[in-house]
Structures are given as C-alpha cells and as structure tokens.
Amino acid sequence: MRKRIISRTTQIAFLIIIFALSFNVDPIKPEVFNVFLPQDFQIRYHNYTEIVDIILHTNNTYPSITDVFSIGKSYLNASVYCVRLTNENITHPKPKVLFVGYHHAREPISAELPLYFIVEATTTYNTDITITNLLDFCEIYIIVALNPDGFAAVEQNHWQRKNVQPIDEDQDGFVDEDPPDDEDGDGFIEWLWQWNGTDWAFIRWEGNDDDDDGLLNEDWIGGVDLNRNYGYQWNATTGSGSPNPSEEDYKGPAPFSEKETQALRGLVLENDFTYAVSFHSGIELILYPWGYSSMPTPHDSLFKEIAGDISALVNAPYAQSAGGLYTLSGTWADWMYGNRNVLAFTCEIYKNDSAWESEPGPLPNSFWERGIFEFFNPSPDEIEPVINRWLPVFTYLTNRTISEAYDVAITSINPAESTIFQGRSTDVNVSVANQGQFTETFNVSLFANVTLIESQEVTLTGGNSTTINFVWNTSEWASGNYEISADTSPIPGEIFTSDNTLIDGTITLRNSYDVTGDGYVGIDDIVAVAEHFGQTPTHTDWDEKFDLTRDGYVGIDDIVLIAEHFGETA
C-alpha cells in the first residue's frame, strides 16, 4: 500500500507592519438580513441553491444597484454566477474591482464572506455613506462560488478540495468508482496515521473497497484543483501543482481545462479590473504574486504596501505567495497579474489548529483523525466574527480603486513676472493633470490671495496633463504682495483632494506712478519719465512702464500723471 508522510503544521514567521487605518463598515446583524431577505435566512453555511436564491433575490429587490448574470457553467452544468454591484443611474465610466470566493470545495467560509458583503451592500445602500460611495463610483464584481458543484461534494466528503470533473485516478478505465466512505457511520471520514518508528505516516482515508479491486479510496469524486489550472506558469516546476491526478493539487490535463476556470477567464478578458481578491481558508494570511517563483514582481513595493494596509485592517500577516507558503503553479493570482496586469491578492481568512480530534486506530501504534472541515471553516456561531473581521478588505480595495480612477491635480504655477505695475496685464501658466482613468471636465481657477482672477473649464483625458494660460489684468487691483494659488473643482468620485489646490509664489503689484520702485512717487519718478521723453515702441530701450497713458508715446501727459500722484506711497 502506498504511504505518504504528511506534515501536520507549517511554522511561518512574519513581520507585521501596523498602519493607522479606519474604514466605516458596519457589522452584519441577523435582523438586517431578516428585513430584506426571505424569513428563513440565517447566518450559517448555505448550499448552492440557497446562494443562488439569495443573489437572485437581491437582483429582483434592488435592480438599480444589482446585476446578476451567469459567466459560464460548471462540470455538472450549474451556472457560475457573478454579481455586479453599482449605481446604474450614474452612467459616468467607472473603475472595476473583482472578488472571488470558493475555489476549493472544502472552504465554504470563502463563499459566505462575499455573499454577506452582497447582502450588506444592497441593504445599506443610501443609508451607509461608505457603501453608497462605493457603489456610486465603482463597479464591484463578485463571484460568490466559482466551484458550485463543490457544495454537494463536500457534504459527502469533507476532504474534497477539487472540482467534480471525473478523473481516472487509478488508471483502470473507470472514473470516481472508489471514493472515501464513512465506513463506521459516525458522520465523519477520518484518516488513519501510524507511527513507523521515525514519523507519523499517513496510511489511508476511511472507506470501503467500492470497486472490489483490493484497493481503498484510490479513485475519488473528481477532479482538478481549480487554483492550479490557470494559464500562467501552469507547467512550472513548483512545490504545489501536481501532474498526478490522484493528488489534491492536480493541475489538470491542460491550462484552463476546466469549465469553471474558463468561466472566470471569460469575465476577466471582458473587463479591465484594477484590483482583485480571491478568498480561501486553511491559514490566516494575505498573499500576493508571484506564487510560482520567489522572484519579486515589478510591482513588489506596491504589493507590499497594499498587503500591509490590509494586514493592519484584519490583523493577519502578509507575504509573497512563494515565500509565505511554497511555490505554486497555475494560480489565479499569478494569471491575473502576469497575463492581465491586475494587482491580485489571495486572502486566506480562517484556520483552526485545535479542530483535530483522534481515536484509536485498527493497527498497532495508529489512530484515526478527523476535523478537516472544522480546520478550514469556523463553527456556525463563529461565522459572523470571521466575516466582520475580513469585510474591510472590500471597502479598502474598492476605495483605493476609486481614488486611483478619479484624481485631478494642480502640478505647477508659473507667473511670467514676479513684479508688475498696476494697470498692466501679466500671464500666469497653470499646469493641471488628470491622474485618473477617464476623460474628465472640470474647472481650474486662479487666485491672488483669496480673490478669484479667472476660472476656465478644462476637458482632459485620463493620464494626461495640460497647461492653461491665465491673463491677470491688474487695472482694478491695489498695489501690494499677492499670494498666487490655483485649484480645481473636485470631480465626482474623487476621494483625495489635497492635490487639487496649489499655492506657489508671490507677485508684487507696484504703484504704476512709482516707476523707480522706491515706494514713493516723487521727483525721481518725474526725472525717470523725462529721460525717456519722446520714445515709442520702436526705440531699442523702450519700456512700457514710462508710458503711463498707454498711448504708445512717452510725453508730457505721462509726466503730468506722475505729478498728479506726487507724494503717494505704497
């Protein structure tokens, strides 16, 4: 009989950087659901039919913010549903973010988290400011359960990880004919361990010889590990991502061989997502690419920044996938990032090391062990705390998506002169950037101190900048020093507005009759004008400040004007 040595636990040490972040996400309470959903709704684990009923109910009840559609079918022809949450009455282009639950059959808690967010978002829209802003200015795509066939399969066998695509694991020409069984009828499928003198060796799962071939449990229901079936580094040599159909992490016969991963691929190819998260369980950890290699990605510092922020919100460590666990081939996050340039994260949201229970086994120095479902999933009365702990992931990443999609900024102010005379005009150039994704129309205003000089409307495509010329006519302004600033009106959806205003420099406005600039209109000013008497703009040393009457000629009338203001001070 084939034996495998399996490690019980993996010790990982992480440095956790705590940030002072706070987002307004109200806890989910049962009475909230009971008001808006069927009266039999409870905070518990839901099967596939119940999940579909809930999301279709939200679609029917809140049609202006909810859109439910199938992105494909599972092996057993169940629809893989996607829920899009957004205020459909706001038609301005919006960024998109994706959340995916339930890749693996034995991790139903990973479906409950996105399901609860859907309920919370739809039932609190228009009453919760945070939720309302998220749906007004972003399109949130949520796949509650990528592996819909898994719900029934895991009820039969709590160890079930893969999908239910039939696989001939024992190469006998038949499929799925000898899965593990609850042979003693206690409601659990246990695994048998025996001490071999050095280690505890895994012997077998509990079960019967269903196909009468003398072997036990060698041909399970299904399947393929969906999170090893994606088409980026699918065939890499890694610690996890097996070519052996009998292994739990079997990667399938080819990239995207499974209907479920094909369905997700189709959705992603049709949409430009900024960020994406896949939820799992079995550890508490935030992971980011690469999984296939410990080599850092080109966006390593950004991945660490975002993962660190999430870590501070949920009090869980973070790491690069290959460094935090082991190397993995064909993962969802690597494909999202490597093929689609989406910053993708995997959130492992629960584990329970105390879940394991044991009883004496039938062999010398052996014991039966159970508790796999409880290891991956909290008890029903612990679901709500787990959900509330990880709900901020939705708020944080959606807010970040919005902040990067809608952002205009004043980048520089460049006056043509630092000193001008009253009554003259001067140019001020203001550079403005649209640092967001979409074409925006907004106002740019120029101020001297707090007084508006001029406003201009600007239309600017995403990722581009322009320079706007303002002309300041100072004829009705008093002399003095003026602080020059510019600002843009915030565009809808803009979260960070600190760069919408820029103060840059001072322009001194001098008395026009004080041509010498000494702060006093006196005889020296009359002399200075007299020295330029008779000049016109054709003279090489022409200076318009001596032409006080603006008639293109320095004459007696200019001297008379100075005399009329004789004795004035700044």
Image (spheres, grey):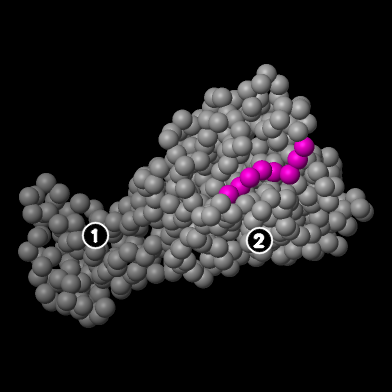
The secondary structure that dominates the magenta segment is strand
Mark 1 or mark 2, which has the lower sequence index?
Answer: 2
Q: Which of 389 and 19 is in front in this view?
A: 389
Q: Give percent across and percent down for residue 216.
A: 70, 35
Question: Where is mark 1, residue-wise?
Answer: 417
Query: Residue 127 got which mark?
Result: none
Give the amino acid at mark 1: Glu
Between circles 1 and 2, the one closer to the viewer is: 2
Q: What x and y, as percent, mark residue 356?
A: 68, 59
Q: Residue furthest right?
A: 39
Question: Which quarter shows the C terminus?
Answer: bottom left
In the rendered view, tell whether residue 465 sits above or below residue 171.
Answer: below
Q: Where does the magenta region start and end?
A: 201-208
Label 1–label 2 contact, CB within 8 A: no
Q: In this view, does 117 lie to the left or right of 548?
A: right
Residue that appears at 19% across and 57% down = 544
Percent of width and height locating residue 521: 20, 76
| Quadrant that contains the N terminus | top right
Q: Which residue is drawn at 53% across and 65% down?
A: 312
Q: Mark 2 points at which residue?
A: 352
Circle 2 packing at 10 Å, graded few (<14), some (14-19), many (20+), is some
